[in-house]
Amino acid sequence: MTINESKIKRDELLQKIEELRAAVAQLEQDGQTASLYTSLSDLEKELMGKKYGLVYERHREEIDDILDTHVPIPAAEPGLSIDRGGPVNFIIEGDNLASLQMLLRTHREKIDIIYIDPPYNRGKRDFIYDDDYIETTDSFRHSKWLSFMERRLRMAKHLLAPHGTIFMSCDDNEQAALRMLCDEIFQERNFEGDIHWRRRHNQPNDKTKLIGLVAEHILVYARDSEKLKAFGVGKVGLTGKFSNPDNDPKGPWATNPWKAAKGRGGVTYTIVTPTGRKLTETWYGTYDTFQQYLADGRVHWTSGGKGIPRIKIYQSEALEQGQCATNWWPNDEVGSNQEATDELKGLFDGTAPFENPKPTAIVKTIVQLGCIKKDALVLDFFAGSGTTAHAVLALNEEDGGGRRFILCTDNQNDLCRSVTLERVRRVLEADDLKASVKYIRMDYLQNAGRLYYEYADGLLQSVGQMIELENGVDFTKQRSLALALSDEELEGLLADAERFAACRVLYLGHDVLMSGPQQAAILQREIEVRMVPDYYYKGLEG
């Protein structure tokens, strides 16, 4: 039997607190004794606090002060949006904590896949906290990073669909801490794996280190592993070597063994090779199944017809089924950091405007693996150079999918506009892709200390962008959609014969009261009416 020394010590301290509380009870009761009671309760609470997991100092950010008194709302930037038809995607410029808070009003439990590549916190000017770079000399370096990540990951969890998955890039510097943080937020039972990506081709020769760093991590969690499995697990493309040495009309093939491994079960019978050799073994399948494979030309005889038979697996069939991913991703399959930089240079006329991007190939693999739906919604709230958008667009072009992306990043050093958005624009134009991008800038509306009616008009001005964001639509380009947030706007729509004739879906503000004739006209046109949802406004009271 083990002895919990910490519990023994804790119980002793709790007993001492009770003795002190009893002693205080004997004193004359006044403000001072009340303060002592409070202090003893605080000590007791601290002793009974968390016993396992991460312990770190929590820090406030400047954005917290803003969000305490303001509602984050979307502000349209029509001059920056891209219209090429096809699915409507979104880029959100601003602090990603504010962006996530806004998305909780429009996308709670609606995101299929989240991929993030957050700052690695190496102490090499890669992590900015409240406009200051965090250096290795900062004694709260890891606490600030964990506090920064915790807030965002807790929101991210609520954005994931029940079958949703989140993939998070990191390196050895914060891998252990991030794993424990995610075990707490997403629960350890929903941990799906720690992918090791070999990001470099070459072998480093750093004489100051015992172990050369060639790999990074991608931690993977499900919102709910059981619901993910029930929904269907994504697969990756096969990596086996296929060839066609016998000119099989069914195309390239690889083989699987037919002889059963020891301890794996099977059926024992005799097979005769093309050379007449009799092989009595334990085989994976029945004799009749083997004969069917033989009749279909799917048997490959080893050793020139004298050896053990193997069963052909055609590449065309295997590609449809895919295979389970492993936790080792070599760069010859999913790209390297150098290839990612070269990819960016190819788009930006020989320059790389962003350090350490991820290769498109690795994010494509993540998207394929993260959700089996070809119309999945993908969120990246550390969007950087826009690799996630590039990967989604490329994957849709390859398999005819209709996946959409939402990217969030700040515009420090003009990152969001000159790199993230510009990369998407160049990919769309270079490959002549049919997809559009709505560009949104985060804005803030003061609600603290104000009654709802005092800032309601400001909220109403953002409703159109909220509807577009939630539903992946564009009111300015899709004439089948209409929005009426007031009685006057509804009257104007019905008076405009051309607009009204084109309308198929009408989003209606919750304060709009339709008259009988208006209802009849809308019903006659078979227009679908969708009320602006109440959750756009819930929890915003100052």
Image (tube, rainbow, N blue to C red):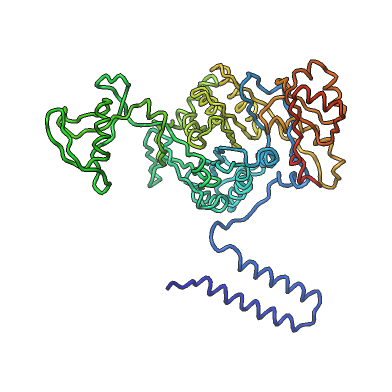
Would residue 268 be found to the left or right of residue 220 on screen? Answer: left
Query: Residue at position x 66%, y 42% from top?
Result: 97
Whether 77 is drawn above or below 1: the answer is above
Indicate the position of residue 263 as horizontal and vertical percent values.
26, 49
Q: Residue at x 61, y 75 (%)?
A: 14
Image coordinates for residue 145, horizontal then vertical, percent: 59, 48
- Residue 347 versus residue 56 in the image, above or below: above
Q: Which residue does the image show at 52% across and 51% down from the upper left?
A: 177
Q: Quadrant of residue 481?
A: top right
Image x and y of residue 165, in percent: 54, 41
Work out which quarter of the rendered image holds the N terminus and state it.
bottom left
Q: Is residue 10 left or right of residue 321?
A: right
**Front residue of this view, candidates 534 and 357:** 534
Observer-nearest of 75 and 264: 264
Q: Which image quadrant is residue 473 in?
A: top right
The residue sitting at 61% across, 64% down in the picture is: 49
Toward the viewer: 527 or 83? 527
